[in-house]
Image (cartoon, rainbow, N blue to C red):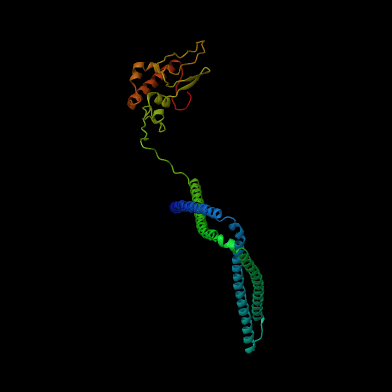
Amino acid sequence: MLLFMHINEEELETLNRAAEDINTMELLLGEARVKFRAAMKDATRKLNELGVKLGSSVEKSRVYYDVREKAKELQQETQAAAVKFERANSHLATAKEMVELAEQEALKEGLVFDTNWQEMLNQATMKVNEAEKDRLESEEMHMATASRYEAAEKEVKRLQRSLKRNINKSKPYFEANNEFKLVLEALKSKVDVLTEQVSLAKGKYKAALQNLEIISSNIHHQRHQTPPEQRESGVGAESTFIESKDGPDSPLSSPHISLKGLGFQEVMEECCPLEKDYEGQNLLLRARRNPCRSISVPSEGDETNSEIDPLSIMSRTLSTDHLDNLSDTSSFVSIEAILDQDRLDTDSILSEEGLECTFERGHRW
């Protein structure tokens, strides 16, 4: 469990750091996007003003600047193709030289070609062939790009001669356009970098969150597998038992009966259940809410089938005044005396009817 807690703290720290990085990067990203939009808006406004000022010369000379831009791109492609061609030539020359040296050494020392030696020469020859293939491809690419670049340069020169006046007049517009383009490209590059950083921070946050979910699931599973410990009694739950004068079998001396904190009515309900099936009638003698009501127990000759009031016995020993003075905080000694007196009166009543009473908790008598 301590290991889980340590890992949990580390993952929480990672989660917090990732959240802070996300917030920081998103703020920077928002600022960069605002700057990019502002720069674009400003560039568009200024270029529109220049276009209105310079008139139709801008549109007429636009073809020249487009062709010149394309010629620059073809020039870069031609240079890259030339570098690739030179590299392929160098690889081819190195591979051929290695094969020649290996053959010369083998012939000089009079060695016999075995299988391993032959395999090595075959691999060297394959490298030579691959280098030759790359050289041919790079050569073809270089020739194609060089041809297109030459054609673009010719077109640039032609347009420059035919549109010389418009080109000179619209020069401020396209120079400003190039400057704005550089600024916007720099801002866009910054936005792209911050977007990538935000994406990485969100990935870390997601991974940390998933790890925390796994740790939480493991802890939950471990708690379910561990048997729960036996709970102890809370503060103030100590029980006070009353030992009855009738002996250990009396309900008051039962170790399962706790009278602490109970009122008189709860004590009577807990300690004095008294039940008997008397001539088909259910006789239940238990203390209830109003112990001062009195009803006589019917004899064998009664023709009425009215039920016996279970509170009639309590009225013989307790008066209304006595109950009013009895509170839930009365001493347990006085309750014990009352219960003993009530039990004696109950036995006398039942003995008058010719019945025998066995006072046991939870059983009929």
In the displayed structure, 306 sits above or below 252; it is above
In the displayed structure, 186 sits above or below 333; it is below
User: Quarter-wise, where is residue 3 in the image?
Assistant: bottom left
165 horizontally vs 244: left or right: right
Residue 4 shows in this picture: no
Q: Which of the two residues, 323 or 117, is positioned nearer the viewer here?
A: 117
Q: Position of residue 202 (x, y in %)?
A: 51, 53
21 horizontally vs 135: left or right: left
In the image, what residue occupies the spot 65% across and 68% down?
151
In the image, what residue occupies the spot 60% across and 60% down?
61
Q: Position of residue 32 (x, y in %)?
A: 48, 54
Residue 213 shows in this picture: yes
In the displayed structure, 164 sits above or below 314; it is below
Residue sitting at the far front: 165
Q: Position of residue 195 (x, y in %)?
A: 51, 55
Q: Position of residue 206 (x, y in %)?
A: 51, 52
Query: How many labels were placed on the picture?
Result: 0
Q: Which of the two residues, 221 or 183, is positioned nearer the viewer here?
A: 183
86 horizontally vs 224: left or right: right
In the image, what residue occupies the spot 59% across and 71% down?
79
Q: Which of the two residues, 186 or 9, is positioned nearer the viewer here?
A: 186
